[in-house]
Image (cartoon, rainbow, N blue to C red):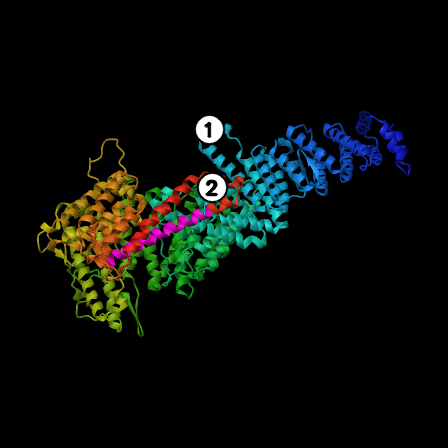
């Protein structure tokens, strides 16, 4: 039969072939096709012959074609055919599809749709034919019957696509179906319909099927809905990441985690590569991504941004045309996130309305951790972004060339948080990516060396952290560090010290690097530039500190620790300790030569020797002998000679210049500290080991010299130093300059001797009398200098020198005095204090209170992590319950109550006895302590109620005290609830006292707060209210912008990417109501402030 068909088809006319085919039954033709196709015998030729004898212009031919199509589709789907045969059949069916009449195309398309919805497809090979059928259908201009309706070809196609997308898709055919649509002409509405269906199928697919599906979606996006594609992909992976975090943080067993982390990261990496590749071909796709993420900035960083989208952006940054835009977007988003966080932390009003968002730092650092899964395309972007953050938000140079350093913690500004994030990105990237380490190190060193005039402390800190991570790893990059040593002589001293401290662990494991540094330092030691020589001294001192001589005390005994690197370095410690002695003694010889150089160089030596001694105790003899011989040059050995020190030898005259030759006060300070440390740490060890005391002879000699200097300094009068009131202290004459230098030396020596005698006093009366005598000498000279400075009014004379009193001395003294201060002030009110006991016009109680105020402020500002220990130390012994945990809030409350009672006692005094200075100090102490209260605690509410009561019931006419109390009230109120009602009441009071701008309007006087009176209403309280009102408006404005951003996202997106916004719709509603609620009092208090 097949030969018959083929022979008839070979004729010029198809009449005989048509007649023959009409004589055949449908089953016969179908069986023939199946037989030929399975055998693979010229089935293509047979199909062409059948199509030739089945013209579509005749109904019988068209129906025969339809049956042939149905039969061929079943054959292809059966899986019985060879791949080449199936492809040939599908190719022929594609070529002939356009010849079909419209109704049969509709019928054929419906069969496809039915098969897809029923899941009857076997391998999906026939789906290649469906886009051709739908395309052919669009070309049909006639009206076609579709169900009960009469539709055009275009409308039929739309209905078919709608039916197809509303039905069930078998999981294995999702990719093929998505790919199919790229060959179908689609309207924007149809593209959206297809996208929505595909995104619904995402969660039903295996993870490995996602990348090819994303690829097909990106191809399909060329027809439109680029933004929808990106939104859906980002939302899907954001949800997967969130799900994984919840699983890992929950109590589920590890084997119950649905998606392995490594597999998820590899899939995400592949998808990112697909998207970036698509953007290189279609720039519009990249622009849509940036628009989508920028639109989410108004609604908050976390709305559109997740670890996946950050990684995607960093990969897109590799495309040159998008690089600048991407980093600007990321930088702006990070800064805005930290700024929003700062705003939220200071406002209970906003905390109640805005849901908690994930931390931007944690999110970006998660990208760094994820990048270990072959995300090489993300790594370069991470490095660039880290440096951009550090460059943009690092410390800035201020007018005098210095910068303000802040303590770590919540006190950081958004700029500081952003800079720290940049450093963390680089550090974590350095840890996990070996290939990028050299580039990071090189860029950090370049910035340290080339930005000498700018603050670079953040880069030095990063360099230190990188090296501390593992110095052994960095040996491969040691050449870069060695190159930076060549610039030491040209860098500022602070930079040199920071750089050498940072690379110190490397010097312990790399002998070549240490040798290179020594050569550079020796050369700098004899340079003409003073800064170069100071840098050399700093470098040698650092080497002495960290290259221990055998037998030195352990780090723990020195209250210092080398750090994590010691894990690697201590492997060689015994060998190095034995070899280091000659090395260190050689350095000591070099440093002794510096004692003949300028005072600045000597000063560096004196300031550094004590640290060296603590870290390298075996150098004690060498250091102390050096100091002893230096002191003898200026010491008067005869016990009856006054003064005991030759100050004239410390000052050098060169022509018209008067210079300090020897910083004798620093020398004595160094000796005092080294001697005290030696007595407390080294001597006890020697006594236990019963070592000979011969080596300690010069220590006793130093002790005797300090004792003699103390006694003779006490006996000496200012006239002995030629520094009495009649002396010339002007800065315009040589004698005046010399006298100022000598006076500075005497005052410094007095401070050193005060600390020395206090340290050896063992709280004896005689020694304390010596301390007081030395202080009186210091004070007399200080008063003379202040008096002379006041007359001359010279700026240089007003400069205060740094104190020589160590922190240990100050802390020991304050520890002894603090409880006395606290007890005395809280036990003896100022009003009952004996008259006459005053200092500088202040009563002793007031001085006690001022001391307390400064201590509380200093502890909070500089030692915030140790506040709990500080408060615990203030507790009365035995006051704590057994085994009961006492919180910081409870401890702070105990102290607050004492000062509240003191303030109430002060307020109960007669008006003439009211001390405004004392009130201001009490309010300042209460403000400091109130910051330690937990805002959600009942103690905080009590404190707020108390502050409000004080302001309502007491009228203070002193502006500063009033301002302090009102600031305390505002600071508490904003952490509890919105202050708009408070501002309204205050504004009414101000309005009542100042009157209206319209003189004819009578203003009803209110008295909500007695603190607002004629004297304080303006400008004191008025300015405070305006300042708080500005903050409220800023918060409301921020909230409105956030709501606008969320609403715009909700209206622009109907994809799964909007699900998070819908989930937050309740909180959005609450925020909207809050804006309306806040606006009413805002309008009112601005109305009341319309005064003259």
Q: Residues within 10 Å of mark 2 (few under 14, many from 20)?
A: some
Tag 1 secondary structure: loop
Q: Specify whether residue 711 is in view.
A: no
- Is 220 above or below relative to 789? above
Say which quadrant the N terminus sits in. Answer: top right
Depth check, front residue: 841 or 92: 92
Give the x, y percent position of residue 60: 81, 32
Residue stretch rendered in magenta on the structure: 1018-1046
Q: Quadrant of residue 799?
A: bottom left
Let me know if residue 1022 is in the magenta part: yes
Total residue callouts: 2
Mark 1, mark 2: which one is toward the viewer? 2
Residue sitting at x 47%, y 52%: 332
Residue sitting at x 38%, y 44%: 1073
Tag 2 secondary structure: helix
Say which quadrant the C terminus sits in. Answer: bottom left
Residue at the spot of label 2: 1061
The chief SS type of the magenta part is helix
Q: Quadrant of residue 196?
A: top right
């Amino acid at each position: 039969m097949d030969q018959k068909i083929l022979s008839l088809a070979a004729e010029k006319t198809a009449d005989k072939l048509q007649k023959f085919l009409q004589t055949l039954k449908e089953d016969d033709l179908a069986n023939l096709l199946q037989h030929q196709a399975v055998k693979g015998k010229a089935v293509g030729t047979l199909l062409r012959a059948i199509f030739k004898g089945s013209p579509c212009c005749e109904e019988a031919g068209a129906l025969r074609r339809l049956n042939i199509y149905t039969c061929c589709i079943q054959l292809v789907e059966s899986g019985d055919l060879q791949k080449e045969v199936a492809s040939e059949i599908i190719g022929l069916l594609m070529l002939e599809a356009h010849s079909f009449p419209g109704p049969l195309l509709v019928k054929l398309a419906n069969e496809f749709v039915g098969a897809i919805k029923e899941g009857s497809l076997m391998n999906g090979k026939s789906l290649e034919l469906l886009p051709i059928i739908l395309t052919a259908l669009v070309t049909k201009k006639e009206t076609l019957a579709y169900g009960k309706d009469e539709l055009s070809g275009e409308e039929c196609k739309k209905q078919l696509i709608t039916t197809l997308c509303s039905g069930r898709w078998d999981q294995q055919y999702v990719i093929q179906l998505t790919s199919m649509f790229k060959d179908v002409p689609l309207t924007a509405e149809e593209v959206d319909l297809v996208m929505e269906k595909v995104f619904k199928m995402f969660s039903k697919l295996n993870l490995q099927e996602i990348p090819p599906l994303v690829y097909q979606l990106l191809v399909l996006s060329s027809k439109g809905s680029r933004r929808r594609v990106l939104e859906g992909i980002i939302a899907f992976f954001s949800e997967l990441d969130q799900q994984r975090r919840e699983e890992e943080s929950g109590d589920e067993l590890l084997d119950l985690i649905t998606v392995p982390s490594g597999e998820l990261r590899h899939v995400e990496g592949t998808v990112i590569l697909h998207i970036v590749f698509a953007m290189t071909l279609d720039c519009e796709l990249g622009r849509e991504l940036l628009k989508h993420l920028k639109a989410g900035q108004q609604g908050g960083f976390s709305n559109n941004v997740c670890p996946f989208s950050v990684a995607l952006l960093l990969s897109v940054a590799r495309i040159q045309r998008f690089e600048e835009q991407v980093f600007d977007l990321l930088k702006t988003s990070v800064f805005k996130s930290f700024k929003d966080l700062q705003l939220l932390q200071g406002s209970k009003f906003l905390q109640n309305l805005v849901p908690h968002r994930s931390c931007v730092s944690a999110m970006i650092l998660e990208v760094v951790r994820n990048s270990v899964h072959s995300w090489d395309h993300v790594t370069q972007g991470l490095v660039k972004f880290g440096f951009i953050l550090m460059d943009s938000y690092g410390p800035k140079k201020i007018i005098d060339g210095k910068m303000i350093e802040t303590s770590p913690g919540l006190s950081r500004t958004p700029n500081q948080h952003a800079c720290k994030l940049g450093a963390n990105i680089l550090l974590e990237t350095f840890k996990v990516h070996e290939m990028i380490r050299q580039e990071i190190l090189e860029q950090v060193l370049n910035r340290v060396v080339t930005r000498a005039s700018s603050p670079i402390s953040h880069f030095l800190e990063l360099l230190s952290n990188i090296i501390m991570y593992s110095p052994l790893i960095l040996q491969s990059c040691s050449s870069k560090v060695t190159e930076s040593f060549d610039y030491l002589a040209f860098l500022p001293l602070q930079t040199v010290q920071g750089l050498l401290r940072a690379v110190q662990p490397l010097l312990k494991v790399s002998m070549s690097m240490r040798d290179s540094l020594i050569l550079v330092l020796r050369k700098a030691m004899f340079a003409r530039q003073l800064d170069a020589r100071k840098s050399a001294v700093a470098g040698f001192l650092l080497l002495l500190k960290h290259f221990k001589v055998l037998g030195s005390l352990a780090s723990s005994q020195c209250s210092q620790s080398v750090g994590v690197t010691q894990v690697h370095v201590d492997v060689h410690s015994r060998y190095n300790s034995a070899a280091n002695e000659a090395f260190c003694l050689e350095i000591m010889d070099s440093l002794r030569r510096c004692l003949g150089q300028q005072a600045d160089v000597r000063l560096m030596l004196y300031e550094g020797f004590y640290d060296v001694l603590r870290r390298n105790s075996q150098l004690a003899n060498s250091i102390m002998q050096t100091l002893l011989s230096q002191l003898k040059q200026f010491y008067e050995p005869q016990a009856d000679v006054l003064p005991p020190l030759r100050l004239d030898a410390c000052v050098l005259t060169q022509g018209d210049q008067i210079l300090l030759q020897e910083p004798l006060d620093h020398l004595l300070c160094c000796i005092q500290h080294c001697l005290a440390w030696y007595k407390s740490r080294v001597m006890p060890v020697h006594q236990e080991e019963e070592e000979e005391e011969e080596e300690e002879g010069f220590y006793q000699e130093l002790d005797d010299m300090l004792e003699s200097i103390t006694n003779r300094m006490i006996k000496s009068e200012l006239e002995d130093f030629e520094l009495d009131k009649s002396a010339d202290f002007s800065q315009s004459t040589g004698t005046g300059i010399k006298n100022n230098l000598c006076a500075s030396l005497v005052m410094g020596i007095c401070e050193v001797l005060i600390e020395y005698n206090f340290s050896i006093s063992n709280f004896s009366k005689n020694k304390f009398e010596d301390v007081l005598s030395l202080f009186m000498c210091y004070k007399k000279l200080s008063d003379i200098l202040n008096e002379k400075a006041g007359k001359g009014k010279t700026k240089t004379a007003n400069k205060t020198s740094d104190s020589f009193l160590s922190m240990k001395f100050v802390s020991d003294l304050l520890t002894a005095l603090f409880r006395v201060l606290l007890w005395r002030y809280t036990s003896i009110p100022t009003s009952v204090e004996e008259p006459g006991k005053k200092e500088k016009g202040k009563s002793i109680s007031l001085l006690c209170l001022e001391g307390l105020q400064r201590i509380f402020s200093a502890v909070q500002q500089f030692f915030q992590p140790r506040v709990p220990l500080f408060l615990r130390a203030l507790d009365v012994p035995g006051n704590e319950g057994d085994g009961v945990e006492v919180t910081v809030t409870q401890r702070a409350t105990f102290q607050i109550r004492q000062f509240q009672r003191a303030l109430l006692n002060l307020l109960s005094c007669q008006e003439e006895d009211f001390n405004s200075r004392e009130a201001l100090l009490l309010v300042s102490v209460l403000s400091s302590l109130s910051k330690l209260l937990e805002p959600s605690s009942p103690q905080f509410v009590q404190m707020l109620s108390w502050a409000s009561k004080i302001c309502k019931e007491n009228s203070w006419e002193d502006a500063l005290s009033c301002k302090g109390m009102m600031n305390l009230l505002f600071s508490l109120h904003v952490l509890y609830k919105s202050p708009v009602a408070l501002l309204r009441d205050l504004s009414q009071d101000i309005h009542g006292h100042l009157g209206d701008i319209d003189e004819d309007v009578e203003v009803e006087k209110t008295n909500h707060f007695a603190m607002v009176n004629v004297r304080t209403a303006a400008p004191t309280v008025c300015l405070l209210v305006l300042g708080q009102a500005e903050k409220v408006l800023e918060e409301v404005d921020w909230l409105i912008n956030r709501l606008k951003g969320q609403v715009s996202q909700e209206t622009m997106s109907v994809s799964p990417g909007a699900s998070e916004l819908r989930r937050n719709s309740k909180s959005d509603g609450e925020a909207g109501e809050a804006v309306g609620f806040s606006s009413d009092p805002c309008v009112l208090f601005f109305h009341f402030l319309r005064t003259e």
